[in-house]
Every structure is written in structure tokens, then in C-alpha cells.
Image (cartoon, rainbow, N blue to C red):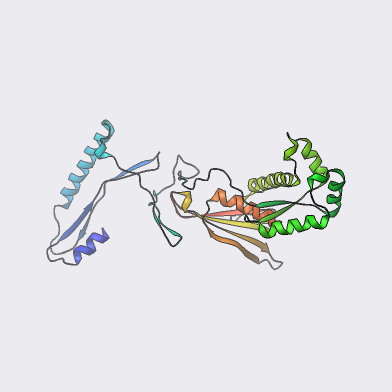
Amino acid sequence: MELVARRARNDSSEIDTVVVSGAYFYSDTFDSFFLWPIDLTPINLDRPFEDFEALRGAWSELATERMTALLREPAAADDTKGPVVDVSFQLDGVTYVMPTPPMGRKSSFFVNGRPRSNSTGITSSPPVATVFASLSRNEWTEFKRRHAPAVSSANYNEWTKREARARSECDLKPFITIPVTHAGWSEWARQQLTATSVSVHRYASDLFQTKILAIINAARERTENSVLPRRYMLLITEEIGQDLAFDVSHLAEVCTLPDGSDLVEEVWTDKSMFFEQALTVAAAEAIARGVECVFWEKDKTYTWD
């Protein structure tokens, strides 16, 4: 309406009134909305459009007629329309998104929010860290005495050098060391189906898997009423439009100082990650930093709702 009125006012000598009308359909796959607005914008106030009410009545009759036909008869090809979707493009590595218009009210059917698509192709958690088995000198000596092939190093110094080299050369961050004991490894090794899968690093990976799942399951939303620990990881995800691929996440470590203020250390920001993906990465960072808790917030300013 604003666009048409502005154009009309560029030369209003021949235009007295602008009428804008349309038929709109919007759906979230359960709730469906049909909108038939008709609105008037006067351009020349000295020449009002006196027949507008009659026009609006005729428009209402047309809407009723078409909606009745839609309910009684199957839609023809000319009556169908594509879905309302986000408009996006990429430029210099940046994705720009014009989200779909909000539906105006929360869904009474989709209690956890209207369904969103996922064009990322990510359906399960990809690797999020490089895990290395950490051995004290005493534990390394115990392995060397009882199960030398499990550590495969001539001496303890060589083992620590291997750890330092792995830390500097690994492509997947964070690099996480998991303390391993011979007693724990022995019990775990007895439960494995084959002897080929009983390396100390495989054992460390299993310990890491158990710990990261515990942190993910214990993650909680940060609200005004949250009781926060002295130190925790804070994950913030901006939900954008209908597609999870457009979401952006940020991660920080928060530490409460003795004076009650918060010291916030940014870990990373503006990562193209949807919430579940980012939460897994946040949990890995928590383990790497020795932090026990992850809290999260969701910014739904631009989400489809």
C-alpha cells in the first residue's frame, strides 16, 4: 500500500484514490490462513471515492464465493501456489536472509514451535573434538609392564612428546586429553568384542562420549530465574527464518567474580550452526576447559513463528 501510494503521489493530477486488494494464503502445514484485504488510500482529498463501500462488498462476496468453491471442489492447477519461503543469497561468504513473515500468533498444535526445515544435511552429530588418552607416569609404567602394546612408546617422555605433537598437528579443535587408568582400561577392554578395538585412545574416546552426553543432557536454558554456577559455558543461538541452515550461534565462558560481576570470555562467535549442532560443540569446549555446565539462550527475533 505504501509503495503504490508513494508512486501515485509522484503525479497525483490524474489519480484520486488508490485501492489495494489481494488474496493471500499462508500455512504451517496444520494451521491455514486465507486473507482477503482491501484498503483505500486517498490521493486527492477533494475527490473522494464514494463507491468504495460497494466495491468492498463485492470483494467480500467474491472472497466468499471462492472460499466456498475451494471447500467443495478440489483445487485446480491454476488455483495452487508454492509455499512461502525464506529468500536468501550469498555474497563474499556471507549469507543474507529475508525471513518469511511471522504468522502472527503461536501455534496451538505445534507446542514446541512451528516446524522448520534443515537443508544442512546434518542429521547426526559430526566429530567435534580430537581426543587423546592422557597417562600419568605411574599409569604409563603400569601399562608398559602389563600391556605394552597398548601404549606403543619406548618411554614416558616419548609418550608425552606424541601428545604434544598431536595437539599441534590436529585439524579438529578443541584438543581434549582424557585421563586414563590401567584399571579402568582393563575392565573396559574385557567388554570389547575384539582385541583390535582396545587401544587406550579408543577407551578415551568412549569416556569422552559418556561425558559429553552427560553435559548435553544437563544443559539448561538461562532465564532470569536460573541459579547459575560460578563458572559455566553460555551458548546463544539466533534462529533465523524457516531453515536451520540460516541459524547463527555464539559461545562464551562466563565466570562470576567475587564482587558479583561476570567475566565473559568469547570462545567463538557468528558460527553458522543450528542449536543442536552448536550445543554439541559447546559441550566439547566445556570438557576441554574443565567446565561442568552449559547454559543456553535462543534469540527468536527473526525465527519463523
Between 137 and 46, the residue placed more toward the observer is: 137
Query: Percent from the top left, x then y, of residue 97?
Result: 41, 56
Q: Residue visible at 23% across and 38% down? A: 66
Residue 255, located in which quarter of the rendered image?
bottom right
Between 118 and 174, the residue placed more toward the observer is: 174
Query: Percent from the top left, x then y, of residue 155?
Result: 83, 54
In this rendering, does residue 36 appear at all? yes
Residue 33, located in which quarter of the rendered image?
top left
Q: Taking 100 as reference, is 48 left or right?
A: left
Q: Residue visible at 84% across and 50% down? A: 139
Q: Residue visible at 69% across and 58% down? A: 167
For the image, the number of numbered tags is 0
Query: Percent from the top left, x then y, of residue 105?
Result: 41, 48
Q: Taking 181 as reference, is 62 left or right?
A: left
Query: Percent from the top left, x then y, of residue 49?
Result: 14, 56
Q: Taking 259 as reference, is 136 left or right?
A: right
Between 40 and 286, the residue placed more toward the observer is: 286
In this rendering, does residue 227 appear at all? no
**Residue pushed farthest bottom?**
259
**Residue pushed farthest front?**
154
Q: Taking 127 as reference, is 98 left or right?
A: left
Q: Where, quadrant-wise, is the N terminus in this rendering?
A: bottom left
